[in-house]
Image: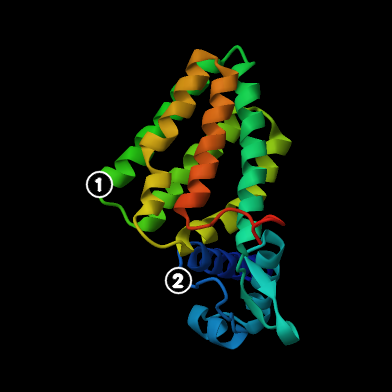
Amino acid sequence: MSSLTRSTTLRERALVALRTAITTGQYRPGDHLGEVEIAERLSVSRGTVREALRHLQQEGLVTAGARGMLRVSQLTPTEVRELFQVREALEGLAVAQIIASPRRQDAAEALRGALAKLRDAFESGADLAAKVEADLGFHLRLCELSGNSILLRTWRQLEGPMRVVIMSAAGERRDVAMSATSHSPIADAIARGDAAAAQEILHRHMTSAIEQLGIGPEATPDTA
C-alpha cells in the first residue's frame, strides 16, 4: 500500500509542478515538453511524467504536434476570442443567477472581497503570476456564487488555457485588463440588482480584455 501511495504522490507532484510551470510562464506556448529532461529535473520516472502530460492534455494545456511531440498549447487569435466568448456566456449566466438569488447582497460583498485581493496584488507590487491568480480569482468567485455546479465545472476547464493566454501576453495593457477598477462595476451592478447593466459591463470587460491582450478584431469576408 505504501508503494502505491508513493506512486500516486509522485504522479501528483509531477502534475502540479508541470501545471505550475506552464501557467506561470516558465514554459511558453509552443515550447517542447521532453519527457527525459522533465523526468531528470523532477527526479521521477518517464512513465510518471508521461501520465502527468497526458492529464495536462485533457486540461487543454498540452497539445500533441508532429510525430506526437508534446508542446505547451498555443491558441490562435480566433481561439482566444472564442475562449473569451465562452467565458462571457458562462459568467453572464452566473451574474443572472446571482441577481435572481435572495442572497444577492451577500454575493456582492463576497465579490468586493475578491476585488480587495486583486487591488492588494497590484498595490503590493506582486509578480505577474500573483496578479493573474487574483484576477481569475474574482471570476472564479463569480461562478462559485452562482450556485450552479455545472457552470463552475465548465468554467474551471477554461482556467488553464486562460492562464496561458494571459501569461503569454506582453505589455502594460495587460495590467489594465486585470485591474480592480475594471472589475468593480460588475460587483456594483450586482449589488444594485441591475441585470442588464451587469451583462453589458461584463461584455465590455471581456471585449476590452481581448483588445488589451493584443488580439485584433475578427476578420470578416469584407475585411479579410
Residue holding disc 2? 26
Mark 2 residue type: Gln
Q: Is residue 106 in view?
A: no
The foreground one among 158 and 14 is 158
Sequence-first disc among 1 and 2: 2
* Residue 86 placement (x, y as % from top left): 67, 44
Mark 1 residue type: Ser
* Residue 115 placement (x, y as % from top left): 40, 34
The foreground one among 218 and 93 is 218
Mark-to-mark CA distance, 1 and 2: 22 Å
Q: Residue furthest top?
A: 102
Q: Is residue 10 in view?
A: yes
* Residue 26 placement (x, y as % from top left): 45, 71
Residue holding disc 1? 124
Mark 2 closeness class: few <14, some 14–19, many ≥20 residues within 10 Å: few
Above or below, comparing residue 176 to residue 20 in the picture: above
Q: In this rendering, would 73 be left or right of 167?
A: right
